[in-house]
Structure formats: structure tokens, C-alpha cells
Image (cartoon, rainbow, N blue to C red):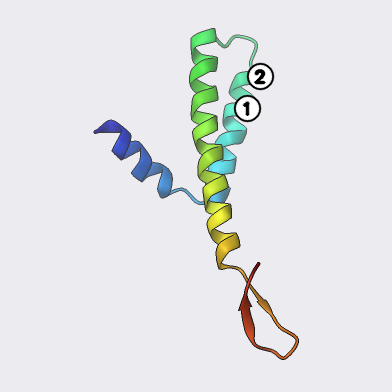
Amino acid sequence: MAKKDEKAEERKLSVEEAFAQIEEKIEALEADDITLEDSFKEYQEGMKLLKLCHEAIEEVEQKVQKIAEDGSLEDFE
């Protein structure tokens, strides 16, 4: 059940919020006193956030439209 809650929580993040959290993960990984276990945890969470960003960006790309020369809207290809 916890995984479903995590997914729902991640979906609520904007891309900007996810990128900000990724920056925090990077800073944590760069710390001198991080344990191997903690670094693995931070890495896993960062990869989940990156996947979320990738999916969100793909979704937006699919919705992007371009204006044709005659002024009509066409789906982005």
C-alpha cells in the first residue's frame, strides 16, 4: 500500500518541484559523511524523481501544438 501512496505523492509534484528535490539528492550524495546505505537510498529516490520528470515532459510534448502557416493548429510531431 505504501508504494501506491508514494506514487500518488510523486504525481502531485510539479516538474520544478521534482527538479528541486533532485538537486537536494545530488547535494546529499556529494556530502562527505554520507553512508553507503544512505547514498543508495538517495540515488533510488533521485531516479524515481527523474522518471517522473521524464514522463511529465513526454506528456507535455505530446500535447504541444504548432501554428500552421494558415493559422490553424496542428498537433506537434
**In the displayed structure image, the side of residue 11 where residue 70 appears, left or right:** right
Q: What is the quadrant of the C terminus in the image?
A: bottom right
Q: Secondary structure at mark 1?
A: helix
Task: Name the residue nearer the viewer: 12 or 70.
Answer: 70
**In this rendering, would 44 be left or right of 26?**
left
Instruction: Identify the residue under disc 1.
Output: 26
Give the residue at the far left of this rendering: 1
Q: Is residue 50 above or below residue 30?
A: below
Amino acid under disc 2: Glu
For mark 2, what is the residue?
30
Q: Nearer the viewer, residue 77 or 12?
A: 77
Cα–Cα gap, marks 1 and 2: 6 Å
Picture residue at 28% right of the left edge, 32% below the top: 2
Point out residue 8 in the picture as x, y percentages from the top left corner: 34, 45
What is the secondary structure assignment of the residue under circle 2? helix
- Residue 17's place in the image compared with 30, above or below, is below
Few, some or many C-alpha atoms within 10 Å of disc 1 (few <14, some 14-19, many ≥20)? some
Amino acid type, mark 1? Ile
Residue 40, image x and y in percent? 52, 16
Task: Please give the name of the residue rendered at 57% of the width and 54% of the height, measured from the top-left corner.
Answer: 58
Q: Quadrant of residue 10?
A: top left
Where's residue 48, x and y in %?
Answer: 49, 34
| In-front residue for pair 55/15 | 55
For the residues bearing labels 1 and 2, Cβ distance under 8 angstroms: yes
Q: Tell me if residue 44 comes above or below residue 6 in the rendering.
A: above
Q: Residue at x 61, y 20 (%)?
A: 29
Q: Residues within 10 Å of mark 2 (few under 14, many from 20)?
A: few
Q: Furthest residue to the bottom? A: 70
Marks counted in the figure total 2
> What's the residue at 60%, 61% (across, down)?
61
In the rendered view, tell whether residue 60 sits above or below residue 7: below
Indicate the quadrant containing the N terminus: top left, top right, bottom left or bottom right. top left
